[in-house]
Amino acid sequence: MGLEDETFETLRTAAAAGVEFDGLRLERADGGYVLETPIETRTGLDPDEFRTALEAVDEYVTNWRYWRETVGSEGQASRAFLRWCERAPLEGSAAESQQTEPLSVPERYDALRNGVDRTWGQLRITARFLDVDEPDGVRVYDLWHVEDADTPLSELEVYDEPREAREISTADDDGRYRPLKTAPTLASGWAFTGLSGSELVDAVDFFYPATIANWHREREGDLDVDHWVDAAKRQSGIYDVVDELPREALEWLTEACCVDSQCLRRREWEYSADDEIDVDGGDGAFPCREPCSLVIAAARKWAILESESETTYELELTTSELNQLEELIDAVADGRVDGVREADVNDGANRYRARYLRAKRFEDGSLNAIESDDQ
Ligand code: SF4
């Protein structure tokens, strides 16, 4: 591809200042221009030779222009995220935390013709060239639910305004409100296509607020983690009680709310800086730096409940009924109650089984349990 005069002048000016980017090195030395790629080094080039040499490494040149002129934002989270999307080497101090083997410019140019897929929580992102036949370096991005990765676009609702991600993320597939944006309950059936880099970042931020910024901070070694003790002490008003939650209850709380099956963030906060919670923080791509509002609200309830003293009750149940109570709790905790078939009376969480147990063991609306004499 021939170089436009304006582009060539831009490159000459850049070479005078020195370019070192993604394997491309340009320099203007006393003996002429220098052009270096991982394949070859050309030195002592006059302007015409320099122009011809640049045209021969078109991929490096258009790549440089895309990141310099279209994306810009050096050192910013948005740029790092877009580089991660196409498996480009991360820049700056984040480079040390590179997780997957980064691709060279020629490898990326090959891959971007078909699209580079990345997964971010329940989002599937595809980075690709705007013009596949004659790539001029400009990338666009498609975004959809991971479960829709193989669904034809014609079967999905297609959006192009990033702000619409906020609406999509409000309710799950059954129309229930999602109080936690990073819960793995994102509704499917939609797609954004042909987004610019900044539009992609905006859309991801609407789906999963602050995840890109915190991911970037973590890679820069700059994630400001706020542990439970400090976060709980800061609460006021009706949440003032939160710091009374016993230490051991933090294990139950994080197992209830923060594990991968419930939240896609990777919990990085602990009880305190020198007291780690035993429950695994998860494998999410993006970190959680502080207890969220959902966890604080739940902790308030548990702090109140945990202030009650324990009592031993006597309750008459058959072994099967005891097992059924355990199955019911499991089914509710794992969110599978809606999936229990009415005809499956072998399942302890079956509606008829539960109704039978209630008819047999409840008296005046509650279990007929009596306090034990051994108190
Ligand atoms: S506190 Fe727990 S539930 Fe809330 S965002 Fe962080 S990991 Fe997820």
Image (cartoon, rainbow, N blue to C red):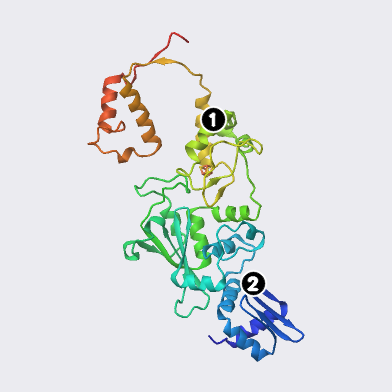
Q: In this view, does 141 lie above or below 186?
A: below
Res. 276 image quadrant: top right
SS state under label 2? strand
The residue type indicated by label 1 comes to: Ala
The residue type indicated by label 2 comes to: Phe
Report the side of 223 relative to 263 (left or right): right
Q: Is mark 1 within 8 Å of ligand 1?
A: no
Res. 351 image quadrant: top left
Q: Is residue 52 above or below residue 76?
A: below
Q: In this view, does 176 lie above or below 65?
A: above
Residue ID for mark 1: 249
Residue 227 on image: x %, y %? 62, 40
Q: Residue at x 27, y 28 (%)?
A: 355
Mark 1 and mark 2 lie on one chain; the one further toward the N terminus is 2
Q: Nearer the viewer, residue 232 or 280?
A: 280
Mark 1 to mark 2 CA distance (whole Å): 51 Å
Q: Residue at x 67, y 59 (%)?
A: 93
